[in-house]
Amino acid sequence: MQRRRSKSVAGTAPNPKKLDVPLRKLSTSSPFTFRRKKSSNVTDVRIAFVGTLGVGKSALTVRFLTRRFIGEYENSADYKYRHMMSLRDEIVHLEVLDARSENDLSNDVIRWADGVCLVYSITDLSSFWTLRTWAHKIRECRKNLVCEFILVGNKQDLSHFRKISTENGRALASELGCSFFEVSAAEDYQSICDALCKLYQEVTLYKNRRKMSIFGRVFKNSHK
Ligand SMILES: Nc1nc2c(ncn2[C@@H]2O[C@H](COP(=O)(O)OP(=O)(O)OP(=O)(O)O)[C@@H](O)[C@H]2O)c(=O)[nH]1
């Protein structure tokens, strides 16, 4: 069945900045508190939503950025958004990519992202198993550079059509060594926010550790 294409989400994002792919327009109302902080406290993190066709990547992205669920989204390209939020006393600059993936996960997306949100639909078995292959592909492609990811089962509100149990979701996450969340872009904002915050924390932890080890190496070499 042909999927309905609708217009982009209406409105304008708070200070949207154009990136190298089309930037969708977002609602003016932001769910986050915009507080000015010292620039040293600002952290940049790139997060990509990936998953097979129709699992709800756009719905999750828009829900996270605007708290809204629109229903139908334009799906003709990858979309990046620039977003700023306040998280535990820290200003966080996020670049969020809603990656349009047909049957494969592109290496460009893997190389671009600091953190990946692997999304499946709990009503679609193949969307679930595909992610196992993709997670291994991410690890392989990044080699020494870790790319943090989380596993997200979307469409929790459609539990009467459920094909993947919560236990199966948890089992795959533990096999992949990542955190697991079940969410509904249609009905719930908080669990999506929790999932993204967890991913953000894991990414920054990794980035900080990496920075420290590089700094440690430089320091050691300069004192030889
Ligand atoms: N019931 C329900 N429907 C959802 C949910 N999330 C997304 N949908 C619906 O699922 C369909 C696909 O959602 P999209 O957000 O366009 O999915 P996508 O993964 O971005 O799709 P592609 O870009 O085509 O790969 C739309 O009809 C959404 O309204 C959800 O949590 N619950």
Image (tube, helix red, strand yellow):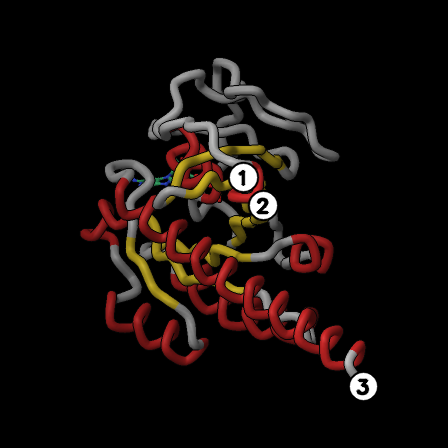
Q: Is residue 100 left or right of residue 187?
A: right
Q: Is residue 65 left or right of residue 187?
A: right
Q: At numbered mark 2, what does the secondary structure look like: helix, strand or loop?
A: strand
Residue at 21% x, 52% y: name it.
159
**Front: mark 3 or 1:** 3
Residue 114 x %, y %: 59, 57
Amino acid tagged 3: Lys
Q: Nearer the viewer, residue 41 or 165?
A: 41
Residue 213 x %, y %: 63, 74
Q: Is residue 193 left or right of residue 206?
A: left
Residue 93 tag number: 1
Quarter of the image for the C terminus: give it: bottom right
Q: Is residue 11 above or below residue 3?
A: above
- Specify the quarter for ligand 1: top left
Labels 3 and 2: the sequence-earlier one = 2
Count residues near mark 3 (Cα–Cα under 10 Å), then give few for <14, some for 14-19, many for 20+. Answer: few
Amino acid tagged 1: His
Q: Which residue is mark 2?
A: 44
Residue 28 x %, y %: 44, 16
Residue 101 x %, y %: 61, 50
Q: CA distance from mark 2 to mark 1?
A: 5 Å
Q: Nearer the viewer, residue 42 or 83?
A: 42
Q: Is residue 36 left or right of residue 48?
A: left
Q: Is residue 155 visible?
A: no
Q: Is residue 33 above or below residue 133?
A: above
State yes or no: discs 2 and 1 in contact (Cβ < 8 Å): yes
Q: CA distance from mark 3 to mark 2?
A: 33 Å
Q: Which residue is mark 3?
A: 224
